[in-house]
């Protein structure tokens, strides 16, 4: 599909959901203008949250990283795929015994949330697949036996095939999920991170604004932009991560961004000038008089 895309949004939104990897920062370095742009948007009175599919760190860890880069953030400002996972499991898989393909943080989080964990494929009700740098044949075999031989359900944190890093990226949850799906023939009943409705609902709840007045700013078509479209939010693709203009030109309608920007500072083109802001204030005073 080929189409022309407008550039930056012409005005500010009431709320912004910013992706992290490839949008706000890459590795341990902020991307050009990202910190200053977020500060300016907040100073204009707009709501900001941060959203990530990466479950390798807690929301508090992400908030700490943002603070270290110069962006004020608390745990409540960050929505992770793990948040969406816990919410989904509580609503759809109560008291389920979980066999988890994930790292210690995820296991600890699920255990603390009250879910019983098991290493026994025969005792698992749900296999949870996540971004796991310790993924190996033993884990794949356990998932295979739980799903294929014992009928366990399959749930995953996120669909990303790889996570962007300064040195070229790391295989992400989508790769682990593909391995489990290939050997079991099963399809995950839910992939709860972006672009799912579960993640979108969590984002809008944190923002506290209507979907039509919110924007998702991210670097991926298949997650950030699809979530924006399906949830009724504006999708702003930033070309600092994994997506090029050529990718946009070839995108399916379901992943087509509403706006495309080269870097984060272009979001501020919709920010009123000081003169415009002063004029607006005076107009409001006259209207109230």
Image: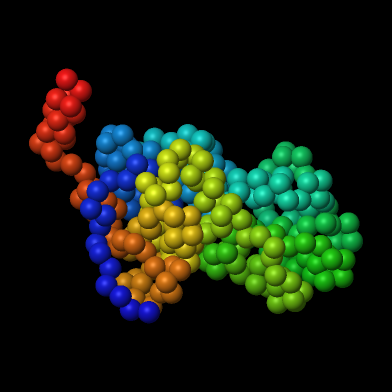
282 sits to left or right of 174 = left
Rendered location of residue 129, percent (x, y): 68, 60
124 sits to left or right of 63 = right
Residue that appears at 32% across and 46% down: 13
In the rendered image, the residue lying farthest to the right is: 122
Residue 35 seen anywhere in this rendered image of the structure: no
In the rendered image, the residue lying farthest to the top is: 289
Residue that appears at 39% across and 68% down: 256
Rendered location of residue 198, percent (x, y): 59, 52
Residue that appears at 82% across and 71% down: 148
Rendered location of residue 113, percent (x, y): 72, 40
**Count the marks: how many?**
0
90 sits to left or right of 287 = right
Q: Quadrant of the N terminus?
A: bottom left
User: Can you say whether 63 is above or below 82 in the image?
Assistant: above
User: Can you say whether 121 is above or below 276 in the image?
Assistant: below
Residue that appears at 61% across and 56% down: 192
Look at the image and name its color scheme. rainbow
User: Can you say whether 177 is above or below 70 in the image?
Assistant: below
Rendering quarter of residue 229: bottom left
Rendered location of residue 86, percent (x, y): 67, 46
Question: Which residue is more in the foreground, 285 or 274?
Answer: 285
263 sits to left or right of 52 = left
Residue 143 seen anywhere in this rendered image of the structure: yes
Q: Quadrant of the C terminus?
A: top left
């Amino acid at each position: 599909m080929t189409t022309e895309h407008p550039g930056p949004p012409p005005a500010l939104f009431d709320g912004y959901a910013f992706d992290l990897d490839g949008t706000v920062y890459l590795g341990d370095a902020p991307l050009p203008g990202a910190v200053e742009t977020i500060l300016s948007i907040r100073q204009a009175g707009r709501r900001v949250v941060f959203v990530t599919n990466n479950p390798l760190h807690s929301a508090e860890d992400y908030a700490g990283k943002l603070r270290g880069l110069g962006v004020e953030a608390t745990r409540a400002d960050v929505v992770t795929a793990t948040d969406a996972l816990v919410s989904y499991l509580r609503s759809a898989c109560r008291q389920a015994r979980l066999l988890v393909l994930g790292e210690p943080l995820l296991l600890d989080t699920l255990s603390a949330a009250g879910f019983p964990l098991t290493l026994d494929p025969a005792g698992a009700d749900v296999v949870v697949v996540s971004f796991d740098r310790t993924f190996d044949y033993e884990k794949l075999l356990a998932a295979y036996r739980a799903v294929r031989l014992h009928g366990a359900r399959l749930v995953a944190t996120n669909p990303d095939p790889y996570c962007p890093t300064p040195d070229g990226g790391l295989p992400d949850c989508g790769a682990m999920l593909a391995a489990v799906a290939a050997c079991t023939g099963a399809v995950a009943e839910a992939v709860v991170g972006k672009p799912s409705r579960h993640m979108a609902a969590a984002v809008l709840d944190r923002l506290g604004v209507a979907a039509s007045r919110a924007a998702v700013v991210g670097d991926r078509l298949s997650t950030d932009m699809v979530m924006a479209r399906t949830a009724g939010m504006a999708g702003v693709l930033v070309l600092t991560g994994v997506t090029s203009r050529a990718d946009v030109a070839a995108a399916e309608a379901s992943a087509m961004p509403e706006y495309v920007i080269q870097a984060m500072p272009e979001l501020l083109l919709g920010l009123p000038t000081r003169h415009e802001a002063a004029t607006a204030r005076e107009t409001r005073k006259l209207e109230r008089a």
